Amino acid sequence: MAKTTGRIGILKGMAFTDAEAAAAWDQGAVAWDAFIESGADYYRLEVHGPALLEACHVTRGAIALDLGAGQGYFSRALARQGAHVTGVELSPVLVVEHEAMQPLGIEYHQISAAAIAEEFPDESFDLVASCMSLQDMADVATTLRGAAAVLRPAGRFVFSVPHPATDVAYRAWERDAAGRKLSLKLDRYFETGATVCDWSMPRLRYRWATPCWRHTLSDWSVMLTGAGFRIDAMLEPRPTPAQIAANPHLEDCARMPYFLIFTCTRR
């Protein structure tokens, strides 16, 4: 998700719970599902989603776990590549009936991603993936350790998050008189911690807010290595000139990195 909606301040010294995150996403579930399924979330559908899927290197028959499956967008993308997919989602409202309408053999578990090591046997998945959702989870560090536990020795952990360099406490586009974007002003990169995202962009059916975390690049590195992962690559997806010509709204994320994909293996 490109969180161009802005932050409502860092919650200094605070955190949030699974229950609070679930309640917030339940509130936005209808708008979120429509946002994706209508094509309005063009950054996801045209830029970071396809890039994440390519980075997963899905092989037919692979056993995959999708963390923070939401309304099932990325679980379905993995299944269409031939993977046997299990999705984990905390919010009961977000897990809508897409599987019932178009069965792909996906099995959904309504649990916290931090509980996957208790829910699934050790070394039971070839691939663990997460599409722009880890930053919205109450206990990221425990989730990362769980991902390492349920991965097979040769398994891969591939996930995307908002790019730490541009998902900062102060972020504003400077515009000309016609409203065209001139330059992106960024500040307070090191102000990390629990915060709130205000989902208020015009492409959404209604407005709501969700708790999330801001982490620096070094924060992610420390958490991943502490969980037992080796970072193999970091990717910064952006649209091609042809994509921008077809959809000029994508032009801004060809100038500055909005998304970061990590590909990791167990150490």
Image: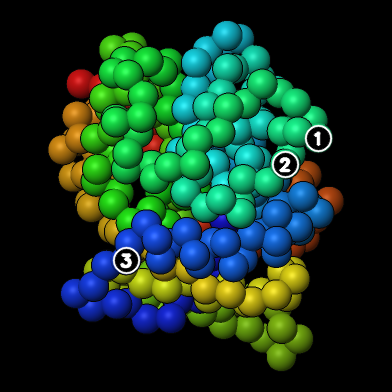
User: Which of the 4 image quadrants contains residue 148?
Assistant: top left
Q: Is residue 130 visible?
A: no
Mark 3–mark 1 distance (CA, rounded to whole Å): 34 Å
Residue 74 placement (x, y as % from top left)? 61, 37
Alpha carbon distance from label 3 to label 2: 28 Å
- Location of residue 20 with respect to 140 vertically, above or below: below
* Crowd tier of the residue under label 2, counting other residues whose Cα lies within 10 Å: few below 14, some 14–19, many 20 or above: few
Badge 2 vs badge 1, beta-carbon distance below 8 Å: yes
Horizontal side, residue 4 vs residue 153: left or right: right
Dot 3 and dot 1 residues touching (CB under 8 Å):
no
The three-letter amino acid code for the residue at tag 1 is: Met
Residue at figure coordinates x 81%, y 35% from the top left:
101
Q: Is residue 4 left or right of residue 99?
A: left
Q: Which residue is mark 1?
A: 101
Closer to the camera in the image, 82 or 256: 82
Instruction: Please tell me the numbered disc located at residue 97.
Output: 2
Residue 231 location, quadrant: top left
